[in-house]
Image (tube, rainbow, N blue to C red):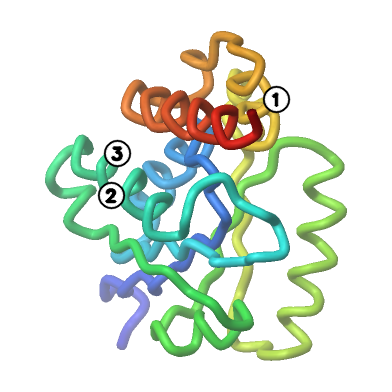
Amino acid sequence: MDALSPKKQPIALYPGTFDPVTLGHLDIIRRGARIFDHLIIAVAENPGKSPLFSSEERASMIRHEISRLENPTKSRIEVIIYNSLLMDCVESQGASVILRGLRAVADFEYEYQMAGMNQQINNKIETVFLMADSVLQPVASRLVKEIAFYNGNITPFVPPYVVQKLQEAVTRKKSFQD
């Protein structure tokens, strides 16, 4: 291949808990899909985090939001659920890039350490970081859930479909606690 030949973009995998998916996550998904030919959104089962939504519910919310994207973009995005070491998931999907979003310095410190560990496991897989949109930098799933639990306005942080699903889940959780 000569220097002028078009180079095929690698497959990227964007892992996360996405409990729930936020506008920040969706921004990274949209931007990642513009960069990579194929983007895999990998929803972690991670029972250690005690998610509000099941992995299938989280994947379903992401699929719903992806279906609303423009056709050339959404056709290059796939959503999977994984319950393994991230690097095993990346390799099994044929990806060579891990896509991560960064909101703040605290994210960078954690992600830098994770990228270093991942590189020790497989140095052929690169980690690419995208900075969060400045408007979305403070948005975090755990904060959105807390705001929703106390009946606060979450519409600036998650899409309408997720607002509905989150309100339903919070209502179920509150009724279970009573």
Q: Residues within 10 Å of mark 2 (few under 14, many from 20)?
A: some
Q: Name the residue located 58 percent from the left edge and 82 percent from the top edge.
A: 84
Which badge, 2 or 1, is on the more N-terminal residue? 2
Q: Are marks 2 and 1 in contact (CB under 8 Å)?
A: no
- For mark 3, what is the residue? 65
Residue 69 shown left or right of residue 131 in the figure: left
Q: Is residue 163 visible?
A: yes
Q: Are marks 3 and 1 in contact (CB under 8 Å)?
A: no
In the rendered view, tell whether residue 8 sits above or below residue 166: below
- For mark 2, what is the residue? 63
Residue 138's mark? 1
Quarter of the picture containing the N terminus is bottom left
Q: Residues within 10 Å of mark 1 (few under 14, many from 20)?
A: few
Which badge, 3 or 1, is on the more N-terminal residue? 3
SS assignment at label 1: loop
Judge depth for marks 2 and 1 and give the one in front: 2
Residue 38 shown left or right of residue 166 in the figure: left
In the rendered view, tell whether residue 53 sits above or below residue 27: below
Q: Looking at the picture, how far across and down is residue 63, in whole percent?
A: 28, 49
Q: Are marks 3 and 2 in contact (CB under 8 Å)?
A: yes
Which amino acid type is marked by label 2? Arg
Which amino acid type is marked by label 1? Pro
Towards the viewer: 155 or 52: 52
Q: Residue furthest front?
A: 178
Q: Looking at the picture, how far across and down is residue 57, in whole percent?
A: 38, 51
Residue 20 shown left or right of residue 144 in the figure: left
Q: Looking at the picture, how far across and down is residue 101, in whole percent?
A: 61, 47
